[in-house]
Image (cartoon, rainbow, N blue to C red):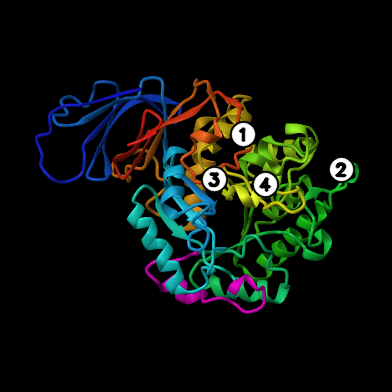
Amino acid sequence: MSTHSQPRTDTGGPDVVLVRGASVLGERTADLLLRDGVVAAVGGPGELGDTDGARVVDADGMVALPGLVDLHTHLRQPGREDAETVASGSRAAAVGGYTAVLAMANTTPVTDTAEAAEHVHDLGVAAGLVDVHPVGAVTRGLGGEELAELGLMHRSRAAVKVFSDDGRCVANPRVMRRALEYVKAFGGVISQHSQDPDLAGPTACCHEGELSGRLGLPGWPGVAEEVVVARDVMLARHTGSRVHVAHASTAGTVEVLRWAKAQGYPVTAEVTPHHLLLTTDLLATANGGYDPTYKVNPPLRPEEDVLALREALADGTIDVVATDHAPHARHDKQHAFVDAAFGMLGLETALSVVASVMVEPGLLTWADVARVMSSRPAEIAGLDRQGRGLEVGAPANLVLVDPSADITVDRDASVSLSRNNPYDGRRFGAAVRATFLRGTPTVLDGALV
């Protein structure tokens, strides 16, 4: 991909950009003219004629998708700016092809008030690379007992519609029911970290099975996720309010979701890139074993779960891919496996992982990728200016992907402040080359503008 600019005839105002020769959704070749923050024109190659003053982006061989939307990002600010900030996380998101991210509430202090939500929102606006939408906590201080300021957060400038105690489960069914009933009034959604605290136990860190026993690691059984998903499905039926299942990780969860959707219950679900690719075997084999890079919550699962998740994403049982981008400072990861922090980076590599495990084997088309990584997440989160098709009048949020790239992930090249990247040294065959937010390029030729 190459870029060049013709002389500008306008003064002030946003750039005019001509994206030339892109394969829109991998289906047809077109030129796209981006002006005043929207897609101003779409035509076949050469049909748009003279575009005096436009910056021309040569997209020959590139797939054009609507800008990606991540329902599950940890930006760590406020409180852990050593691991990530809204600005650094926004850079990572833009490099990964994202134009909107939802920032989880487990910061310090917790995003459980209107003021806290507006603070995160304002930091995102100041960074200016992606739209940052704060997720509000379900309960005050993530304590699981008293509802947070759900209505006030929604009515704030941040206009919060997604609420989650992610990192902790809303384990009390009465509290979960009350939260669902409360957010129903304004079309909100509760994103649940499905982990029964009694079944998993306070030190669980490895999928419960033969491997956890052999390694001597506290087991995290799949049923600890599945029973919460099943309970919340029934609460969604009872209240008529929306439940979103965060980071689904087991074949049993897929079974529950498939049943719930067949009944028409208001339930959606996400899967992470790492749960689509990595398996629990890495805990015994990678880097000599016990590598805390691979400690994540929910844990990596066996191959049979990974295959079930891929199938569920392909057939629509799982709605979206969400990164659960979870940066950590080195000193939080460099411990014995049991004591290390949970989490992996994901924003910069998500598209490459999905292309590798879903597109290359024929499980998803590029149009499907647009659905599971852009339009459907935007719909779940209620973002009407994101996830739109690349058509005239739509906001000019888009990403250009090289579907035949040959890249090797280097964790030290990341624009995140953290380095807990589980894909370091892995090769992938697709990569983001450009990202545009409302017509303005934030990434060109794979690098921040």
Given this view, does label 4 or label 3 mark the residue nearer the observer?
Answer: 4
Q: Nearer the viewer, residue 395 or 105?
A: 105
Residue on which disc 4 sits: 334
Residue depicted at 43% across the width and 62% down the height? 120
Q: Earlier in the sequence, mark 4 or mark 1?
A: 4
Query: How far, Cα to Cα, is label 2 from label 4?
Result: 18 Å
Question: What segment carries the magenta color?
Answer: 141-161
Residue on which disc 2 sits: 215
Q: Residues within 10 Å of mark 1 (few under 14, many from 20)?
A: many
Given this view, does label 3 or label 1 mark the residue nearer the observer?
Answer: 3
Asked whether, in this view, residue 247 is left or right of residue 158, the answer is: right
Image spot of residue 1 (x, y percent): 36, 22
Q: Secondary structure at mark 1?
A: loop
Given this view, does label 1 or label 2 mark the residue nearer the observer?
Answer: 2
Q: Earlier in the sequence, mark 4 or mark 3?
A: 4
Q: Are marks 4 and 3 in contact (CB under 8 Å)?
A: no
| Location of residue 100 with respect to 151 vertically, above or below | above
Considering every residue shown, the one lying at the far bottom of the view is: 146
Residue on which disc 1 sits: 423
Residue depicted at 53% across the width and 69% down the height? 109
Q: Secondary structure at mark 4?
A: loop
Residue on which disc 3 sits: 418
Question: Toward which corner of the image does residue 443 lie, by quadrant?
Answer: top left
Q: Earlier in the sequence, mark 3 or mark 1?
A: 3
Dot label at residue 194? none
Given this view, does label 4 or label 1 mark the residue nearer the observer?
Answer: 4
> Which amino acid is tagged 3?
Ser
